[in-house]
Image (cartoon, rainbow, N blue to C red):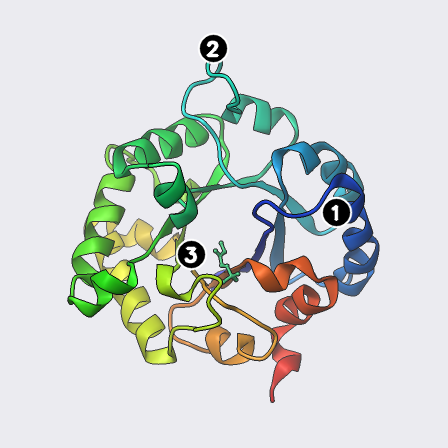
Amino acid sequence: MQTKLFVANWKMHKTVKEALNFLNDFIPAVEKIKDREIGIAPTFICLESVGKAIKNTNIKLCAQNAFYEKKGAYTGEISPVMLKDLNVEYVIIGHSERRKYFNETDEIVNRKIKSCIEEYLKVIFCIGETLEERQSNKTFDVLKRQIEKGVEDIINPDYIVIAYEPVWAIGTGIVATESQIEEAHGFIKERLKNLYGERAQAIRILYGGSVTPENIYSIMNTENVDGVLVGGASLDPVKFSKIVKYEEQIN
Ligand code: 13P
């Protein structure tokens, strides 16, 4: 069985001080947990101090993005080499907010994934359809395209985790139903099997979109869900620790 993965995507939230305050409450709440992975993706400017605060804990440092070049004249960008230097373990790539607000295409996402893997960074590769795409029955075409283009020329999938985040469920309070998640994750698993054969078994598939302590138990008990990528609810140490300890949240 796969080790479950719970990642907080803080997006553009929290100053350094706020991040450290969060950890003061969160670290003791989860410190005994050994059977699952926990990650926090703060903003770039919080990486160093969060990294120091979680050193020697069971929490892994994650980044929200990376550029595809290692260094150079790219004002405002951060490279995978720099993230590795700060002991980042996972990098979120291809989040729908990056695709929407920063025009990241499948090709750019693919270059970023390759560049992270070259530095031995694990990638949380986000895919997901918009509401319009779902309503016009294009969900599976979109997922297929995003997967195939995103991992193009990547022979070794060992550093890849997929996050299925339907765009219409992100920050809306509308969580995908168990059957929608099961269907999408099953489809993703099949595509990965087509690409990587038996090696695809090792690729974890996370769900993301309006995950809360109230719905985590049923999400985690859905077929082919190997963890979650959490936005809003991960900003609160109590809520995120409840999500990580999902078995205790039976309503
Ligand atoms: P919410 O949990 O706020 O819906 O955000 C999900 C997300 O985008 C995680 O990457």
Let me know if residue 156 appears in the view.
yes
According to the picture, the residue beneath numbered tag 2 turns out to be 72
Where residue 181 appears, as percent x and y from the top left, is 35, 71
Q: CA distance from mark 3 to mark 2?
A: 33 Å
For this orientation, the residue located farthest to the top is 73
Question: Which tag is nearer the camera, tag 1 or tag 3?
Answer: 1
Whether residue 35 is situated above or below residue 19 in the rendered picture? below
Answer with mark 2 or mark 1, whichever residue precedes in sequence.
1
Let me know if residue 151 appears in the view.
no
Identified at 32% across, 56% down, the residue is 128
Residue toward you, 29 or 224? 29
Where residue 39 appears, as percent x and y from the top left, is 61, 51
According to the picture, the residue beneath numbered tag 3 turns out to be 204
Number of residue marks: 3
Identified at 29% across, 59% down, the residue is 130
Amino acid type for the residue under numbered disc 1: Ala
Where residue 216 appears, as percent x and y from the top left, is 54, 74
Determine the image quadrant of residue 168. Answer: bottom left
According to the picture, the residue beneath numbered tag 1 turns out to be 19
Question: Which tag is nearer the camera, tag 3 or tag 2?
Answer: 2
Whether residue 118 is situated above or below residue 155 in the rendered picture? above
Q: Is residue 200 left or right of residue 229?
A: left
Tags 1 and 3 touching, CB below 8 Å? no
Determine the image quadrant of residue 110. Answer: top left
Q: Assign the C terminus to one quadrant of the image.
A: bottom right
Whether residue 170 is situated above or below residue 41 in the rendered picture? below
Q: CA distance from mark 2 to mark 1?
A: 30 Å
SS class, disc 3: loop
